[in-house]
Structures are given as C-alpha cells and as structure tokens.
Amino acid sequence: MARNGTFDQAAFARYGLLVAVGLFATGVLGETALPVLFGALPAWEHALFVDFEALGIVLALVSVFGFGIVWPLVE
C-alpha cells in the first residue's frame, strides 16, 4: 500500500490530545465552578458537562493510541 504523504499522524495525535484535554477541562470546570457561581445546575447542563468529561477521556485515548501508535504501525 502506498503511503500518503499528506497525512500527518503526529499532528493528529497532538491536536487530538489538545482538544481532548480542553473538553475534559471544560467538563471539570463546568461541574465545579458553575454551581459555586450560579447555584445548582439544571439536569441537561450536568449531563452535558459529564459527557464532555467522558468524551475528553475517550478522545484522548483514541488520538494517542490510534493516531500515535497504531496508525504508524499499520502503515
């Protein structure tokens, strides 16, 4: 199989990890800071921030292992 020179695995792994950390940090800060500042969160906001945390963890694992380790070994 020919290697595609336009696909940069390191950049995908790096920026995917940065997006994942941002999602996780948004979820954690939203869960901790917003109730202190504005009172109790509605259920949909609580679910949104929990989903941000979970999606951040999953995206971090996929971007590091998928694009950083597995994809270069498959090529």
Image: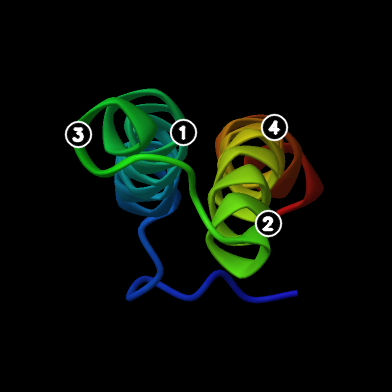
Residue that mark 1 sits on = 31
Residue that mark 2 sits on = 47
Residue plotted at (47% across, 42% down): 40
Residue plotted at (46% across, 40% down): 27
- Residue type at mark 1: give it: Glu
Q: Nearer the viewer, residue 2 or 27?
A: 27
- Residue type at mark 2: give it: Ala
In the drawing, what numbered circle is on residue 65? Answer: 4
Position above or below: 46 against 40: below
Residue 8 picture location, percent across and down: 36, 58
How many residues crowd mark 2 within 10 Å: few (<14), some (14–19), many (20+)?
some
Q: Is disc 3 placed on a helix, strand or loop?
A: helix
Q: Nearer the viewer, residue 9 or 23?
A: 23
Residue plotted at (53% across, 61% down): 45
Which of the marked residues, 3 or 2, is nearer the chain's N terminus? 3
Relative placement, left or right, of 5 versus 20 is left
Determine which quarter of the picture holds residue 50. Answer: top right
Position above or below: 12 against 27: below
Residue that mark 3 sits on = 37
- Residue type at mark 3: give it: Leu
Mark 2 vs mark 4, CA separation in Å: 27 Å
- Discs 2/4, front: 2
Relative placement, left or right, of 21 versus 66 is left
Mark 4 vs mark 3, CA separation in Å: 37 Å
Which of the marked residues, 2 or 1, is nearer the chain's N terminus? 1
Mark 1 vs mark 4, CA separation in Å: 28 Å
- Residue type at mark 4: give it: Phe
Residue 55 picture location, percent across and down: 65, 50
Residue 20 picture location, percent across and down: 45, 42
For the N terminus, the image quarter is: bottom right
Mark 3 vs mark 2, CA separation in Å: 18 Å
